[in-house]
Each structure stands twice: as C-alpha cells, then as structure tokens.
Image (tube, coloured by chain):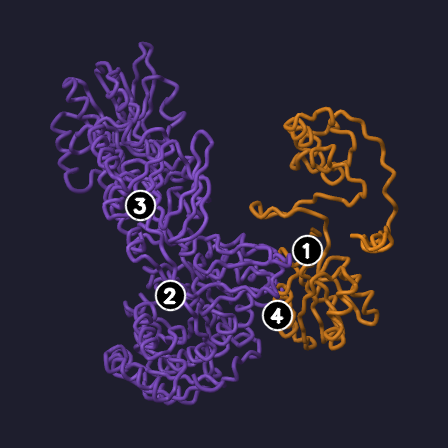
C-alpha cells in the first residue's frame, strides 16, 4: 500500500443494458474521477465477467490501488466474487466496497434516466466515502473438535447420532429420562404403515447401541454450555447430581416436545372417559381399552387458537385417523366419529389413508370454532356430544359415547424452555426452537455450530423428524469434516481505555460474546469473543461510554456515508431527501427484491446497509437530519425474525425514544419512520418509500441547514 | 448506585437560555452506567440542544461534550475538566446532585446546571427494566437482622418493628396495595432461613443518625495516622 492517502479505484458496470440502458455510465465514471482519493475510474460492460475481473486486478497493480469500489449490482450476490478478486490481487478483501446502482437504482427508476444518473453518482460517492475509511481485517481460523453432542434421545436424536457416528465422528447422546425413545415410547402404532412403534424404536436403538462411536448418557441433562463452534465445553449433570464435562465441536438440539394436556376443556380430567389421543394409545398398548360401542374424537383441541397456541400441530388429523382405524381393526362395529375443523391429511400416502378410514365407515363431521362441540355427561356415565354440523346447518347430538378422545397439539416442554437460555438459542413465539432463517437456514441456529431437528423445532411426523435429523447431522458434519472454520471479521471491538465496565454489552449480546472480565490490574472491562460475535452492533449502540466500534461498520464510516448521501441542493420543485437504513438480512434483501421485480419507486432515497437495524445509533439519525436530510427511514426484519434474535426490538424501542425527543426539540416526529420489511417484501419496500416521499412532500423541506459534510467531500 | 433521571428537555433548554457555549459533562459512574449520563447521552443531548436552538431560531449554541470517571470526586473534577471548562461559558452536568455541586464548588466562576434529577440509592433490575430504591443511607445498617431487606428504605412507614395492620396479601396500603410490604418480605426471608427469632426481636428508636450535612473522614487518612498500614 502506498503513501498515507488512500488510493481508490472505481469500476462502474454497464451490466449490458441493465444499468447502462438507464444510467449514463460514462458520466458516473467521470464524476467518480473527481472524488477525493479516487486515482482511477473506469467502466466495464460486465464487471463480473472475466475481462472485468481482470481489469480490476490489473488496475490494482498498475495504479497501486488500496481500495476498490465496484458500482454494479447487489453485494448480496456479487460481493464474494469481487472480494475474492481483490484478494487475488493481493488486497485485503475488507478494503472492497460495493455501490449497488442496479437493484437500488437503474431497475427501479427506469423511467427517469436523469435522476437515476444523479442518484447513481450519489451512491458511488457514498461508497467512496466509506471505502476511504475502510480498514483491512483479519479473519480468525478456529479448529473444530470432531465430536458432537446430541441433546435428546428420541427418534430425532437417535437418528442424528447414528448418522454422525456413521461418518466417523464421536457422538455423545444425552437423554433426560432413564430410557431412550422419547415420544415414540408412548405411541402404539405409527401412521401410515400401522407398524408397531416399539418395533421401529427397537431397531433404531439397536443400530445406536451397536455403534462404538456413540456414548449414550441417560438420566442426564445439560447444565451449562460455554465456548463456540468447534470448541463447546458442556457441563452435564446426572440425576444423582454428579457432573461431567464434554468437549464437543457441534451441538444438535433434539429435545422433542410434549403433548398438550387440555385441562378444563371438554370435561378433560373432570369426566374419566374424556382422554387425549396419547392416553388412548396407552390404553391400546396396555390392552385396557375395553370394548367401546361409540367413540367421538375432537380435533384441534387447544390448537389453532386466536391467541397462545395459534399453530396447527400437523400430526393430529393423521393420529386421529390412525387410532380410529386401530379401533375398527379391534372392533368392527364400534362407531367412530371424528369432529374436525379442517382435515389436514397432506402429502404422500396420507390422502389414501383418509379414504381408507371413510371406507371403514369412520364418520367425519366438520365443526366451526365459533360453535365448538360440547361434551355433556349422561346419568349412566356415558357422554353426549353436541355438535353444530356445518354441512347441514343443524345441531346434532351423538348420544351414549363411551369415550371422547381429544386431539391436542404438541407443545414445548419445561426442559426445552430451560435449555434455551443455557445454549443461548432462541424460542419462537410458539415456544418451539427458532431456526436462523425459515427458508435459507431451516436446520441451523443463528449461533454457529448448533443445529435443531425433530419436534423440538415444531410439530412433525416421525418421518419428517428423521429427515430433519439426517439434515442436522449433515449440517453439523460440515465444520467437523473441514476441521476448521473461518469467522467473519465484522465484529465488535472494545476500546478498553474508554470502557467503564458497566456490563450493558454483556446484557444485550444475544450470543454471549461480550463479557465483563477483570484486567490484571483490577479494572473490569468488556471483552468480545470474536468467534462468537456476529457483528449485529447492538452493544455498540447501547454502550454509554461509546467505547465499542463495529469493524467494517464503524461510526465514522457510516457518518461518512450519511454526510455524502445527497449532494445537489434542491432546485425547482421540492424533492425530499430520504435516507434509509436497511438491515443486511431482511430489508436490504427486500430492497433488492423490489429491484429484481422492477417495482418502480421515486428516486428520492439513498440507502445505507447495516448488519442489523439494532446498529442504527440515535446519533446517526440526528446527524442525518443535520446534514440536510428531510426524512429518515429505519428498516429491519419483522419482530421474531431478526437474524440477530432481538436487534430489531432494540431498534424499535430506540425509535420510539428518538421520536419523543424529536417532538420535544421541535422537529416533526413524522420525519423519522420505522418499517419492518422482510426479504420477500419487495413490493412493501417500494410502497413504504412511495408513501414516505409523498408524506415528506406534504411536510415540506426540513428547516435545518446543512451542517455536516463528512470527509471534505463537496 | 445513585439513581438519576434526565430532566425534561424543555427544562434543560430553558435553564440554558442566554448561554451560547455549553460544556456537557457526563459521568462514567452511576449515571453513565445505565445510559443516563454517559458520553453517549452527552452526545445525544448535544445534538438535541443544537437542533432545538436552530429550530426555535433562538441564539446559536455551541456544545462540547466530555466525561469524567466520577463527578463526585473534586480532585478528578479539578484535574480532568480544567481545559474544557475554561473554553466554555456554562456547564451542564449529567451527574447526580453531588456531581453538580462538586463542579460548582471547583469552578466557582462558571454557572453549572443540573441535567438530571437525583432520585435515590437503588438497585438495577434489567430483566424487569426497572430501578428500585434499596437504601436510605441511615448510617446504622441492620440488614443482618432483617434477612437483607431494608425496612428503612422499603417499608413505606419506615417501621423498625413491623408489620403494621396495613398490609393485605403482602401488599402495602400506602400506594394503594401495589407495592410489596417490606415486613412480609422480611418474614418470608427469615422463615426461609429458620431465623424467625429475629422477626420478633424488639428494636429501639435509633439515635445514631446525625443531622445533615454529615461528614466522614477518608479511610486513607485514618490508616495514615496509624502508621501507614492499610
């Protein structure tokens, strides 16, 4: 690297006509050449094509570039390629910055080439402003212990353990009960094969026990987990109180679920002949069922509620059909009714299963949740079930029922709730374990090296649990097979001099990466475990001493972007200047989707990408207003979907406070807005922008004079 | 910890009327620790003040920010703030009442304004998102006898021998049965520890407490007089 001043190279991509068809690329290149520290600027037809890549590498060498800006498409797809290009030319990959002038500009302002070109210049200027302040970063490489801990010895845990052991990894399987098997131990037969549950379990346990790579610990629970991917230290406790420690590289959560007990519903635990499906299965197993003449099953008991357990438990319809068929098999003449809301017998083989039940004369009656069935005791000990039959619009009575069986959902159990804070992995609003991303990372937790499978993750059939267990084993095997992982360098960095040892960072960190430690001289300071840190920035924003910086998203870098986001003083008709902060995972992806879908919106916005909406410091908002911006929009993942567990909730709490401050200052609080925009909500992103631009037009220009110009850029 | 809260912004703004060059002094002690008076809050307040003055089109204001490890130490305040104070014409303290007075005492010629209201000595409970009063600095601690629950700070009537007849289901009549009766808490705690004998112990009216302003010699000067032992 040469000299003290950065040497920035800018490469503007035509992307065929995608960019070049709207934006005046040569003009953007000429403009880039005038920016401070830019020593080289050029354009490519396709920067990502091999000649484009070569031109970057050549220019780095020829012009001694130490910062590279590519103005083209979204960093979400092409940043890895350009970063690799920089590395190949000997430049640290963190000295690369991308300016998205396709998704965020040419595709969404296709009808206004003039303003699109103006905006593209602004986007490039913002990228250059940040690039000048970029710093090289080193990524840490961590060794991975080739062993795995599997928590929960049900069918999912057993399967995951066997899969991993078959690949040659050391496996510890722990189960809180005395015996393996979990829910499967309580079941009679399994649908749709009507195979004995005990047979399946016996085979699975047989495979497991035969394996020399697997250590099974029953009557054992996890007490404490320390460390990070590759190096977890797990304290386990046996029922007799003895503790042990395991060193593992990965952890799979397969803790299962329990059956909801519908206390006080339909006379459950009030009348002895009102039972759950699970209790019915136990009667089958023990042979204590007797010979009932009439059985009524009620579906969706405690499930699909407006509040609380809002979810469909997925397996109950099949369970009811299975048990109804079992009864018919034992006693052909027994009347069996299934009262349902919507019959969910989806997928392979299950539709047929339903037909089979109908052939056996099992009666299906639909009810509506507004008028649920009623269970009324008779003097002879039998039950009458009253039901409003939707199909005939009439209330009917099913008299002399020997048994009413309630189909209840699977729910998270106490042990699962207790495990969540120990592992520092989240539960969703349904209280089941919550994956990193519903579609893209359905098996992983946001914390590296911890995975989930089976009903711990939500209600599932046995075959689905087994499939997911195999998937979790495969995911866990990746870092263990590679033997090491690299961690991204976008992490928090503590200025120990400034740190006051308050511990707020430790409190807000969803990953347990920040910790107060005592220095040899006695002072308590925050210490960040860089492997565990995911770079959300929650700690940096809450730090009362402003002692934490986020690598690659430093305050000075973001302020530089804010200060350079709009250059041209408004002429003629007022066009509001709106600055958007978008989180990398949801809202930025949403903005990209608006681009890919070519949803047009006004070109009044400039966008700053942050890792999490929780990174948006109130100071950024004030600085934005002081740099002449008319409106600030903070966007993040929907509540419950934050990539960093709870960063968006911090953003929301802070947003409310900043709005109240603005009001007191005499600013219009409407100038600040918050919107939850997911990766699939491109249309929403565009409409939020449209609304905000329209509203800001009504409000008129901010009366604040521009007082912030960052980095001398004019 | 000394529990403080930020004064209403309007009040701060009107206090500072007529002043142009302000130094906001944060405190890295109690008020800094829970986001009321640290450097970040000082910087946010600076933005707010400058924006408000501009929007109200009143006199321009120029604000600088700084923090000290503790505003309640006159030595620190004298040494660490001298240069910044010299440059500005008024000071806004984000320390507790002690901090404000310390700065005012050290820099007699500069007007010093309190940015905070000082509330009590209390405990922070992050999971509840609240701060609770726990101590009234009575100079005669009897927590050993009350299961670690202070009746001076937590009994609304400060009863040394309680409870009175004003509790229902463990809630105190003062405040409309919303707050815990300290004496019920004490009873539960002592029962848990098998020390209900302490509950019935009679406590006399206490006379130890001096009238304010109280004074105390520093421990270090005591050890000095004993020949330098610490």
Mark 3: give few (<14), some (14-19) or many (20+) Cα within 10 Å.
many
Q: Colour of chain B?
A: orange
Vertical relation: A642 (above or below) B157: below
Q: Distance between the residues labelled 1 and 4?
A: 23 Å
State the quadrant of the N terminus of chain A.
bottom left
**Which residue is depicted at the point 31% across and 65% down?**
A593
Task: Check if mark 4 and mark 3 are on a common chain.
Answer: no
Residue A523 quadrant: bottom right
Q: How far apart are marks 2 and 1 (CA)?
A: 39 Å
Which residue is disc 1 drawn over? B30
Residue A308: where, in percent of width, then height?
41, 39
Which residue is disc 2 drawn over? A588
Label 1 with label 4: CB-CB less than 8 Å: no
Q: For the residue labelled by badge 1, is the local secondary structure a helix, a strand or a loop?
A: helix
Q: Mark 3 or mark 2: which comes first in sequence?
A: 3
Label 3 with label 2: CB-CB less than 8 Å: no
Q: For the residue labelled by badge 3, is the local secondary structure a helix, a strand or a loop?
A: strand
In the rendering, which numbered label is found on residue B189?
none
Q: Distance between the residues labelled 4 and 2?
A: 28 Å
Task: Check if mark 2 and mark 1 are on a common chain.
Answer: no
In the rendering, which numbered label is found on residue B47?
4
Q: Colour of chain A?
A: purple
Which label lies toward us, 4 or 3? 3
**Which residue is depicted at the point 37% across and 28% down?**
A261
Label 2 with label 1: CB-CB less than 8 Å: no
Label 1 marks which chain's residue? B
Mark 2: give few (<14), some (14-19) or many (20+) Cα within 10 Å.
many
Which label lies toward us, 2 or 1? 1
Q: Distance between the residues labelled 3 and 1?
A: 50 Å
Residue B45: where, in percent of width, then height?
64, 66
In the rendering, which numbered label is found on residue A170?
3
Mark 1: give few (<14), some (14-19) or many (20+) Cα within 10 Å.
many
């Amino acid at each position: 690297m040469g000299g003290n001043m950065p040497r920035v190279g800018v490469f503007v991509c035509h992307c065929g006509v995608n960019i070049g068809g709207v934006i005046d690329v040569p003009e953007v290149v000429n403009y880039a050449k005038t920016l401070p520290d830019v020593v080289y600027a050029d354009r490519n037809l396709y920067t990502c094509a091999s000649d484009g890549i070569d031109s970057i590498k050549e220019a780095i060498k020829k012009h001694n570039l130490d910062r590279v800006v590519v103005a083209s498409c979204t960093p979400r797809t092409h940043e890895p390629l350009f970063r690799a290009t920089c590395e190949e030319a000997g430049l640290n990959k963190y000295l690369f910055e991308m300016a998205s002038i396709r998704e965020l500009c040419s595709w969404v302002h296709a009808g206004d080439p003039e303003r699109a070109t103006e905006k593209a210049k602004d986007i490039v200027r913002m990228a250059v402003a940040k690039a000048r302040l970029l710093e090289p970063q080193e990524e840490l490489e961590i060794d991975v212990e080739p062993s795995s801990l599997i928590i929960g010895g049900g069918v999912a845990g057993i399967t995951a353990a066997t899969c991993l052991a078959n690949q040659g990894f050391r496996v510890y399987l722990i189960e809180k009960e005395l015996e393996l098997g979990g829910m499967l131990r309580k079941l009679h037969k399994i649908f749709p094969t009507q195979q004995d549950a005990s047979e399946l379990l016996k085979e699975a346990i047989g495979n497991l026990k035969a394996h020399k790579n697997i250590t099974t610990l029953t009557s054992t629970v996890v007490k404490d987990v320390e460390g990070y991917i590759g190096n977890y230290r797990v304290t386990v406790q046996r029922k007799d109180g003895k503790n042990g420690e395991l060193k593992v590289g990965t952890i799979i959560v397969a803790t299962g679920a329990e059956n909801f007990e519908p206390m006080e519903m339909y006379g459950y635990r009030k009348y002895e002949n009102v039972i759950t499906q699970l209790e019915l299965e136990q009667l089958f197993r023990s042979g204590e069922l007797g010979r009932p003449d009439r059985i009524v099953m009620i579906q969706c008991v405690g499930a699909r509620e407006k509040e609380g357990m809002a979810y469909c438990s997925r397996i109950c319809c099949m369970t009811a059909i299975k048990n109804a068929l079992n009864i018919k098999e034992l006693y052909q003449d027994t009347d069996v009714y299934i009262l349902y809301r919507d019959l969910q017998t989806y997928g392979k083989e299950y539709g047929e299963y339903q037909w089979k039940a109908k052939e056996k004369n099992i009666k299906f009656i639909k009810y509506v949740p507004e008028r649920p069935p009623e269970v009324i005791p008779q003097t002879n000990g039998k039950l009458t079930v009253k039901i409003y039959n939707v199909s005939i619009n009439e209330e009917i009575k099913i008299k002399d029922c020997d048994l009413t069986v309630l189909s209840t959902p699977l729910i998270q159990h106490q042990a699962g709730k207790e495990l969540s804070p120990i592992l520092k992995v989240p539960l969703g609003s349904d209280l089941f374990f919550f994956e990193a991303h519903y579609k893209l990372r359905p098996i992983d937790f946001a914390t590296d090296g911890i995975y989930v499978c089976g009903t711990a993750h939500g209600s599932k059939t046995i075959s689905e649990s087994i499939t997911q267990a195999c998937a979790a084993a495969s995911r866990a095997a990746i870092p263990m097979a590679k033997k090491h992982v690299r961690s991204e360098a976008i992490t928090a960095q503590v200025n120990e001099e400034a740190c006051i040892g308050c511990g707020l960072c430790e409190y807000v960190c969803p990953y347990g990466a920040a910790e107060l430690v005592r220095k040899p001289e006695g002072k308590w300071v925050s210490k960040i475990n860089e492997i565990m840190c995911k770079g959300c920035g929650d700690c940096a924003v809450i730090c009362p001493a402003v002692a934490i910086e986020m690598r690659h998203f430093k305050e000075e870098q973001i302020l530089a972007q804010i200060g350079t986001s709009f250059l041209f003083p408004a002429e003629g008709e007022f066009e509001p200047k709106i600055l958007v902060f978008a989180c990398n995972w949801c809202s930025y992806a949403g903005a990209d989707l608006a681009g890919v879908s070519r949803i047009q919106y006004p070109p009044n916005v400039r966008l700053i990408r942050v890792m999490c909406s929780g990174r948006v410091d109130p100071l950024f908002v004030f600085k934005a207003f002081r740099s002449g911006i008319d409106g600030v929009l903070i966007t993040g993942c929907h509540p419950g979907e934050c990539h960093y567990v709870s960063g968006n909730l911090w953003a929301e709490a802070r947003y409310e406070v900043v709005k109240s401050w603005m009001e007191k200052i005499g600013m219009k609080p409407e100038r600040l807005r918050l919107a939850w925009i997911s990766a699939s909500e491109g249309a929403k992103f565009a409409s939020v922008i449209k609304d905000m631009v329209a509203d800001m037009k009504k409000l008129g220009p901010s009366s604040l004079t521009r007082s912030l110009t960052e980095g001398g850029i004019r | 910890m000394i529990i403080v809260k930020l004064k209403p912004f309007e009040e701060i703004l009107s206090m500072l009327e007529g002043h142009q060059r302000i130094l906001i002094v944060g405190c890295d002690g109690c008020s800094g620790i829970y986001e009321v008076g640290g450097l970040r809050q000082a910087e946010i307040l600076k933005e707010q003040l400058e924006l408000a003055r501009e929007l109200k089109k009143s006199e321009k204001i120029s604000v600088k920010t700084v923090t000290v490890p503790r505003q309640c130490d006159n030595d620190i305040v004298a040494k660490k703030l001298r240069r910044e104070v010299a440059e500005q014409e008024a000071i806004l303290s984000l320390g507790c009442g002690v901090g404000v007075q310390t700065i005012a005492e050290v820099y007699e010629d500069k007007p010093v304004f309190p940015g905070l209201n000082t509330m009590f000595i209390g405990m922070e409970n992050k999971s509840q998102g609240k701060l609770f009063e726990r101590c009234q600095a009575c100079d005669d601690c009897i927590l050993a006898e009350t299961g670690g629950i202070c009746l001076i700070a937590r009994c609304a009537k400060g009863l040394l021998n309680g409870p009175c007849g004003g509790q229902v289901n463990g809630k105190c009549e003062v405040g409309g049965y919303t707050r815990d009766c300290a004496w019920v808490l004490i009873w539960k705690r002592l029962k848990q520890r098998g020390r209900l004998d302490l509950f019935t112990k009679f406590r006399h009216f206490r006379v130890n407490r001096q009238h304010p302003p109280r004074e105390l010699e520093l421990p270090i000067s005591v050890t000095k007089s004993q020949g330098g032992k610490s």
